[in-house]
Amino acid sequence: MPGLTSLVVHSVAGGFRPSSSRLSRWRAEAKRIIRLSETFRELSDHDLHRRGSELRWKAKSGTTLRSLLPEAYALVRESSRRTKGMSHFPVQVMGAIALFEGHIAEMQTGEGKTLTAVPAGFLRALVGKGCHVVTVNDYLAKRDAEHMGPIYEALGVSVGVILTDMEPDERRENYAKDVTYGTAKEFGFDFLRDRLRKGAEEGDVERTRPFGTGAGEQELPVQRGHYFALVDEADSVLVDEARTPLIIGLTRQNDPATVNLLRWSRLTASKLERNSDFLFKPDRREARLTDHGCRKVLLTGKPKLIEAIDMEKIYETVEKLLVAQHGFVRDRDYVIVEDKIVIVDESTGRTMDGRKWQDGLHQAVEAKERIPITALTGQAARITVQAFFRRYQNLAGMTGTAWAVRGELKKTYSINVSVIPTNRPCIRKGLKPRVFRTLEAKWRAVAEETERLSAEGRAVLIGTPSVEASEALAEKLATRGIRHEVLNARYPEKEAEIVSRAGRSGAVMIATNMAGRGTDILLDDVARKTGGLHVVATEMHSASRIDRQLVGRAARQGDPGSYQFFLSLEDELLRFWPPEKRLRWLKQAGTADVLDAGWVKRFKGTQRTIERQHRKQRKEMLKHEKQRTQSYAKMGLDPYLELTE
């Protein structure tokens, strides 16, 4: 820890405000680290490697990591300069210090978070207990491991990566590395598979034997404990994904009666009238049959195969089909790939391969879309995102938008958020939002604005909330002859290639939510001279943080840039409210296509309401998880395996 005198000096410098005092201390320490790294330029590659190995020996001998931090970070900075041609800026060193001290470092888009993670990962890896660097998808995990690997390896630290299609032996080998990159999903599922592999009677599953090739190795868990996790896009992983638990399913055979019931329920649900036969709550995605609706379902003719099924189950299945029909929209909540439903993550716009909605909802959506119905799944093991990451002895993270949820992160994970200053002043310009009565009017205005900006030589990024919206806008641009590219859940493999072209003069890219894209939009000289990247946000999202992530794509690293919101009363955000309320608003708006700026308040109010509801859902899930864990512990059961239904 810093000396008492140093703490007093920085407290005074920071006006006795904890956050400002920390920044003052980190800034001073970063300067010392950079000066030290300059002295390492004279070292040979062999000597650099030796210095890294000496630090490992000191760490394993009991020397505190805090006392090793300056030399470790200076070595990483020099290694990065030699292997990648990149030297950490002072603000990146400050961010790395924040990560070591267990903070979430809020760093703006384009500030180099991937490089910032390396010093903290190297220092934590020295004790030999494993360092997990968590990214948002396999592509970024593999890319970051390959791109940052040479920096670690030059200092004697090994790097591995966990990918979805890996076998247990390969996973075990990569978890044995000093630093392991992977996704939260893979780390969490490997934890659950280890619990299943060893069984509840073994107690807490941690590897106690060294890696080897002897008999019985196949029975060892693949992971070797949970010492340190460094989470990229931390708010997306720790907050947005926290409403959905990680579940390993047990497949059950689909009997003909169940399939028949789902098909029949689809037809029946389509004939029921809202507010008369059933009530639907869009904010909760819940449907309940009224007494009138129950009578109608009861009296509707049924195939012989389902006559033996009790009416309670029939009512439940019809309600699930109602939720599928009214609460889930194709190309917004899911896409269909080779006759399979693939869920789309609402916060990132990415597909979530292998994930299924539970309790028969996934099968209800399949029935709605008239595609083959997959087998129902039970639960073999489950854990919430909150419970999984609270298992780590040390936790840190990076993102561009954590400040808004700092209270929740502190309460749930006992982790602070620190805002790291930008390397260069941000000169992003925000234009006044424009509000339209209908989607058609909005798309027309977006197309006109895009055509104008593109002709001026600006690079244009148009953010949309769903696949459906991105493709609807693409049609509008195509009819006007505007050349463009589309980045959405249908083309994940082309993501980096498409983003790499988005900063060219006159380029137009339509993209679903940009959270965690992981590839910077680099401007060419012409685009920079004509005003840089302009972001057109075609809707407000369910969380203001996601809007900030999109807007943050413009004006990175001191570049010029601007943004503007285009909104309409038919936007997906407002589908949160009942149809009657939306109709009232349309009537109040009159017949004019363009509305005054006062309507923006209704969008912001809706956004805040949804944010509160999501926060409440996460709070309830965490409360339930704690109660469940406590009750299972009293019974001597494993809360992740036993009685998961």
Image (cartoon, rainbow, N blue to C red):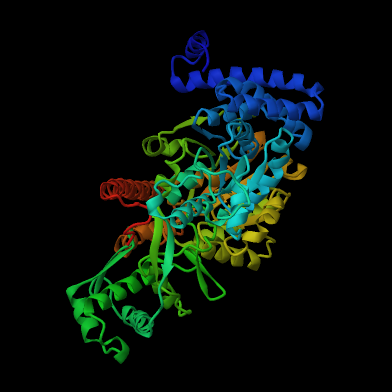
- Residue drawn at 44 percent across, 49 percent down: 240
- Position of 527 with respect to 69 (left or right) is right
Q: Is residue 121 above or below residue 501?
A: above
Tell me where residue 24 sits by quadrant. Answer: top right
Q: Residue furthest top?
A: 5
- Relative horizontal placement of residue 251, taking residue 612 as reference (left or right): right
In the picture provided, is 30 more to the left or to the right than 620? right
Choose between 461 and 114: the one closer to the eye: 114
Residue beneath the point at 74% across and 31% down: 79
Which one is in front, 495 or 382? Answer: 382
Residue 242's place in the image compared with 228, above or below, is: below
Q: For the view shown, which residue lies furthest in the front direction?
A: 215
- Residue 532, position as x, y percentages in the image: 68, 42
Q: Position of residue 75 (x, y in %)?
A: 70, 26
Q: Position of residue 193 (x, y in %)?
A: 48, 56
Quadrant housing the C terminus: bottom left
Give the tally of numbered discs. Answer: 0
Residue 275 relative to residue 3: left or right: left
x, y percent for residue 177? 63, 43
Can residue 432 be seen in this snapshot? no
Residue 31 picture quarter? top right
The answer to whether 262 is drawn above or below residue 565 in the figure is below
